[in-house]
Image (tube, helix red, strand yellow):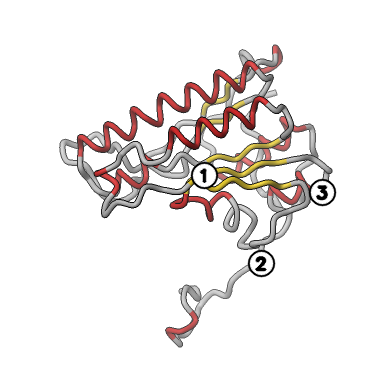
């Protein structure tokens, strides 16, 4: 349907649509500082793909790559590099330098694909513990944290673990030290297209016309 690999010499029904005014660019154009951090398996997702398939960092965009463990399959190391990512991220948060920090904790996805139940549970426990550390330190340094996923994988309420992505809705959590956000209401039934507009509202930046989503915050 779309050109996934040019070497296939296959007919394409839908050409690539160039992406403009992605979240990172809007933040950069406003003169704000941002950080992207993940481990090898998802580093491209918080950099290249997050920037609309543009490899060059924006002005004021810094990147941290943590190496993923070298194992045959990640059920053999379900903690992956999440603790190293978290330790480094907490150091960066303490600098109070960045207006936007994007981090991908990859365990639930990568270990979930193995379908090994004990390893998946361990991966979820590690991510849960590290997410708690990140949010707590973020609150201490007056950061608002948005916690969410782009798909399900680790749990589908079945006895057997699936190795593919699930279609179940994912949770969106907002944690903030700001008095105006402590008891804020969030809209229901929305999607990933609404994340960037929500971030821009929190940063006090206008939403560009290219973004079709809406803020998740009820005002």
Which residue matches tag 3?
29
Query: How far apart in space, not on screen, are marks 1 and 2 (Cα)?
Result: 25 Å
Q: Nearer the viewer, mark 1 or mark 2?
A: 1
Q: Is residue 33 left or right of residue 184?
A: right
Residue 204 position, x and y percent, is 79, 32
Q: Is residue 45 above or below residue 100?
A: below
Marks 2 and 1: in contact by CB < 8 Å? no
Which residue matches tag 2?
18
Q: Identify the residue at horizontal 45%, vertical 31% (top origin).
A: 171
Q: Helix, strand or loop at disc 1?
A: strand
Q: Helix, strand or loop at disc 3?
A: helix
Residue 138 position, x and y percent, is 61, 23
**Quick one: which residue is furthest to the left in this view?**
159
| Mark 3 residue crowding within 10 angstroms, few (<14) / some (14–19) / many (20+) | few
Label for residue 38? 1
| Mark 2 residue crowding within 10 angstroms, few (<14) / some (14–19) / many (20+) | few
Q: Identify the residue at horizontal 74%, vertical 51% (top origin).
A: 25
Q: How many labels sit on residues?
A: 3
Query: How far apart in space, not on screen, are marks 1 and 3 (Cα)?
Result: 23 Å
Residue 119 position, x and y percent, is 24, 37
Camera-side residue of 88 and 42: 88
Q: Is residue 1 left or right of residue 30?
A: left
Q: Is residue 197 above or below residue 217?
A: below
Quarter of the image holding residue 80? top left
Q: Identify the residue at horizontal 49%, vertical 81% (top origin).
A: 6
Quarter of the image for the C terminus: give it: top right
Q: Is residue 91 left or right of residue 95?
A: left
Residue 145 position, x and y percent, is 59, 27
């Amino acid at each position: 349907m779309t050109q996934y690999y040019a070497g296939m010499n296959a007919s394409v029904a839908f050409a690539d649509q160039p992406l403009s005014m992605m979240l990172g660019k809007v933040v950069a154009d406003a003169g704000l500082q941002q950080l992207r951090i993940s481990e090898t398996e998802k580093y491209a997702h918080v950099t290249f793909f997050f920037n609309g398939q543009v490899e060059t960092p924006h002005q004021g965009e810094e990147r941290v790559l943590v190496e993923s463990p070298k194992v045959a399959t990640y059920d053999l190391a379900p903690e992956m590099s999440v603790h190293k990512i978290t330790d480094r991220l907490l150091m960066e948060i303490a600098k109070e330098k960045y207006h936007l920090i994007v981090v991908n904790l990859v365990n639930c996805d990568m270990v979930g694909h193995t379908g090994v139940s004990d390893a998946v549970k361990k991966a979820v426990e590690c991510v849960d513990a590290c997410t708690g550390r990140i949010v707590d330190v973020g609150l201490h340094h007056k950061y608002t944290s948005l916690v969410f996923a782009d798909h399900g994988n680790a749990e589908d309420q079945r006895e057997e673990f699936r190795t593919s992505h699930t279609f179940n809705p994912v949770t969106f959590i907002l944690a903030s030290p700001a008095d105006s956000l402590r008891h804020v209401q969030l809209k229901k039934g929305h999607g990933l297209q609404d994340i960037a507009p929500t971030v821009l509202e929190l940063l006090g930046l206008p939403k560009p016309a290219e973004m079709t989503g809406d803020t998740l915050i009820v005002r």
